[in-house]
Every structure is written in structure tokens, then in C-alpha cells.
Image (cartoon, grey):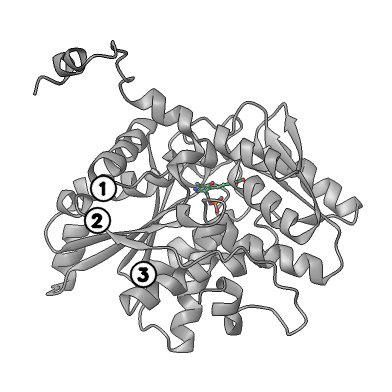
Amino acid sequence: MWNGIIERYKKFLPITEKTPVITLKEGNTPLIPSRYASSLIGSGVEVYFKCEGFNPTCSFKDRGMTLAISKALEAGSRACMCASTGNTSASASAYAARAGMRCIVLIPEGAIALGKLSQAMIHGADVLAVKGNFDDALNIVKEITKRYPITLVNSINPYRIEGQKTGAFEICDVLGDAPEFHAIPVGNAGNITAYWKGYKEYKDSGASKKLPVMLGFQASGAAPIVKGHPIKNPKTIATAIRIGNPASWKQAQGARDESGGIIDMVTDREILDAYKMLASKEGIFAEPASAASVAGILKLAKKGYFYRKQRTENREQSIRIVCVLTGHGLKDPDRAIASVKKPKSIRPKVEAVLEHLKL
Ligand code: AN7
């Protein structure tokens, strides 16, 4: 029976017998082989999607939150707080509810997806909409959690990173080793930090043999790491990664440089094309930010990046690329509906239906 990432990977996690484990049985998410994207990248390439939208609150944040909330409870904390573009707040509020803990979330007003807002609200968090962006909200949370006995559960909380690294373990367990490439969207840069840490620890333990090349992708209107400076007014339709000054900036650069990888950016158009392609050709509904990883590898493929790698390594086996699809598409129903043609309204008659179908 699957009992969540803490039980499955406890020897890699900072827990003791005394840690009260708060779990919604997160993790064990499917690694789905691509049917379509692989063919766009080229022959000898296999693309896989790590579908993190299948977690209990429908994003990867649950892996870190189970540990952060369990450790907060162990330390006697009665309240937690975060700033969020949406998914962190959804996850924190669910795990805090489960733990019987107060949860306070600060969100950028008018800039988080509807599904995420509904989650934080229904789980009973104190939701405050800040007239500012994510970076402003995070600064306020840092200040308040310094002054009051409230646990900060953004990814600067090291337990968040520890929990999230289990995504890398699962990928290695399924593939038998790390993939050649790991593609991931980058917002506050916690997840790329966590995956790189996970891949390194798994290799050190002997559970895997190699390390992947890390490929991180930001939205072009919110690409501080690519541009080399914080972005004051980040803009992108991928609201989850609308972040101008990532907390784990240095660690993300570390993952890029140690792995020989890249942190690049993709336009909103490229993100939306990948988003629609995933839904219509792969049957996978992921949120726009998640599609940045797929948009990114398609961009690199067009420049011959993977082809060159194959040539220089003179490979016989195919190259495996894992794209992390970080959150479920239902998080942002407005974006889905705005992206495609509306359903036609017709009379309740067989002829009326047939007229439109042109069978
Ligand atoms: C779907 O919820 O930052 O680079 O406050 O929700 O680890 O920040 C969300 C980030 C990618 C970026 N994909 O991950 C938040 C928040 C989705 C996300 C990211 C987020 P990080």
C-alpha cells in the first residue's frame, strides 16, 4: 500500500520515530510516455511526463508540504504561513487542515488561478489578497514569520525542498536510472533545486548511476535568472511562475552549472501552444506553467540541441527526457476556456445536432 513520500523514502528524509506524519498519500505520480511530443523532438528521443497534477491537491507542492507541516507539528507550531501564486497556498491549506493547524496565505490580488483560490478558501485558510505581486507578498511573509511564532512554508523552508526531491527518486525508480535530461518550469526555483538534490543523493546512495542534464524554463516576461537581474513587474499568462526575484536563484544556477544544463525562457505563445498540444495530442491536461517545460524542450529541439547531444555522444540507445508537469489543468479553468472555441449552442433536435456535425 502506498502511504506517501515520507514513509516510502524516509531514509533520505530528516525525520525520526517521533515525527507526526501528516500525509494525504502524496507522490507515486505517473510517469507517462509521450505519444506525440517525442516525434516532434526527433528519432531516438523518448519524452516522459511526470504528472504531478495527480497529487492530492493537484500539484507537486504536496511532496514538500507533507514534510514541512509534519516537521512544524513536531516542533509544536500551531500556525503556518506562505506567499503564493496559488499552488503553495492550496497545498499548505490542505495539509494544515489535516494537521489541525492555522494557515495564513498571502496571494497577489487578481493574479491567481480560480481553482487554486477555491482550494485555499474551502480548506479554511485565512486568505489575504495583497495589492502587489508574489515577490511583495513573500517579503511580508518573511518579515511576519520572523517576528511571530508562525512557520513559514514557502520553499525557503528546507523541509519543502527535502520532500520535493522525492520526485527525482520516483523517476529513477521507474526508469531504472536517471534520464539524460530533466526539463522543469522555474518560478521561485525551489523545485529545480529539489530535483537536482534528489538526483545527486540517489546517485550517491547507489540507487541510480548517472545524473541528468537539468533544463529549466522561465516565462519570457518573468525570466530573472535568464536575464541576470530581478524583474520588477513580472508578466505572463502562466500565473504560477509569475515571479521576479526567485528565492532559490543561486541554487537553480548551481543545478544548471553542475549538470551542464540550461535555464532558458519561453514566450507565452510557446507556453500556450505546448499547453494545447499536451491536452489535444497527449490527453494530458496540465496547467500553463507546467507546459513551459514542454515548450522549452521543443524550443531547444528546433535549435538541434538534442540532435547535437546524440551525435557527440554517439549514442545507440535513445535519449530520455523527463518533463515535469507540475500542476493539473483544472487549476486554471478560465485559461482552458479562453484558449479554444466555445461550444455551439443549438436547438434540442437530432437534425440540429446533425447539421453541425456534418457526418
Ligand atoms: C504549477 O504556488 O511559487 O520554481 O507560490 O505552481 O519551485 O517555484 C508555484 C510555483 C511551476 C514553479 N509550476 O516552481 C506558488 C509557486 C507550477 C507552480 C512552479 C510553480 P518553483
Q: Residues within 10 Å of mark 2 (few under 14, many from 20)?
A: some
Q: Which mark is residue 34?
A: 2
Label 1 residue near ligand 1, CB within 8 Å: no
Q: Residue furthest bottom?
A: 206
- Residue 91, horizontal then vertical, whole percent: 63, 52
Q: Quadrant of the C terminus?
A: top left
Q: Dot 3 corresponds to which residue? A: 212
Q: Earlier in the sequence, mark 2 or mark 3?
A: 2
Give the foreground label among 3 and 1: 1
Q: Hey, what amino acid is under mark 1? A: Glu
Discs 1, 2 touching: Cβ within 8 Å: yes
- Residue 6, horizontal then vertical, whole percent: 61, 74
Q: Residue at x 56, y 42 (%)?
A: 229
Give the secondary structure at mark 3. Answer: loop
Residue 237 visible, this orientation: no
Vertical side of 133 occupied by 356: above or below: above
Discs 2, 3 touching: Cβ within 8 Å: no
